[in-house]
Image (spheres, rainbow, N blue to C red):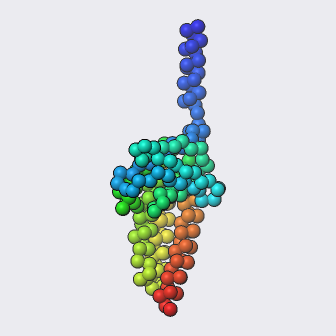
Amino acid sequence: MKTTSIFIAVCALFLTACMNPQDTPVILRLSISNGPPIDTLFLSDYHQGVNIALVADSQGNFHDTLDLKEGLYYLDFGLEYTTVYLKNGYDLAIHIGDFEVFDESIKASGKGKKVNNFLFEQLLEKEATFDDIAALEPDEFERSKQYFLESQQQKLSKLSFIFPTKMSAALTDKLDNELDEYDLYYQRLYSFKQS
């Protein structure tokens, strides 16, 4: 009897150790130190029709276990949003230090932190590059856009060892879409400025 119990325990340990991390759902935790009370966040994907409501616990923190397809997701806080990269096997904690400076204070820790901190830094750089977009003349806008594109591509190539191929493709698509959106936004601003 004792031998059977030990055998079962060893088998269970072995099977757990052999599990593929891709079979393990994403564990996602979110917290905000200084900000408005938020009772629900929304996680949605770019193309797959996923829209998940995350509900805060009694302390205002969020914790969920999600079985998701690997990819980029929007995390919508109502007045603010960010992009996160999730895949099964991640155990990711995201903390916003101060909601007033959301983009500057968002940090990731745990499994998946390198990819997500890169995304948060990319958002800050994009904002810094295009903050004064309305004041730019068309040639200045194009130079600014080209500089941003080249710097992001350079970073992606330097960090390619961190990112899976699927992630790199998703980031490249996201970057292209964002630049297209900036083009449209700038064209509207510039035509309004000219009228």
Q: Number of numbered discs present?
A: 0
Residue at the image point whose x is 49% and y is 70% from the top: 149
Residue 49 in sight here:
yes
Nearer to the camera, 82 or 99: 99
**Image x and y of residue 175, in percent:** 53, 66
Q: Quadrant of residue 35?
A: bottom left
Q: Quadrant of residue 122?
A: bottom left
- Reply above or below: 88 against 77: above
Residue at the image point whose x is 53% and y is 82% from the top: 188
Along the horizontal axis of the image, is 128 left or right of 83?
A: left
Residue 155 in sight here:
no
Residue at the image point whose x is 35% and y is 51% from the top: 33
Nearer to the camera, 105 or 99: 99
- Reply above or below: 34 against 13: below
**Image x and y of residue 93, in percent:** 44, 46
**Quadrant containing the N terminus in the rendered view:** top right
Q: Quadrant of residue 105?
A: bottom left
| Outermost top residue | 1
| Outermost right residue | 48
**Image x and y of residue 156, in percent:** 49, 60
**Image x and y of residue 194, in percent:** 49, 91
Nearer to the camera, 129 or 190: 190
- Reply above or below: 84 against 187: above
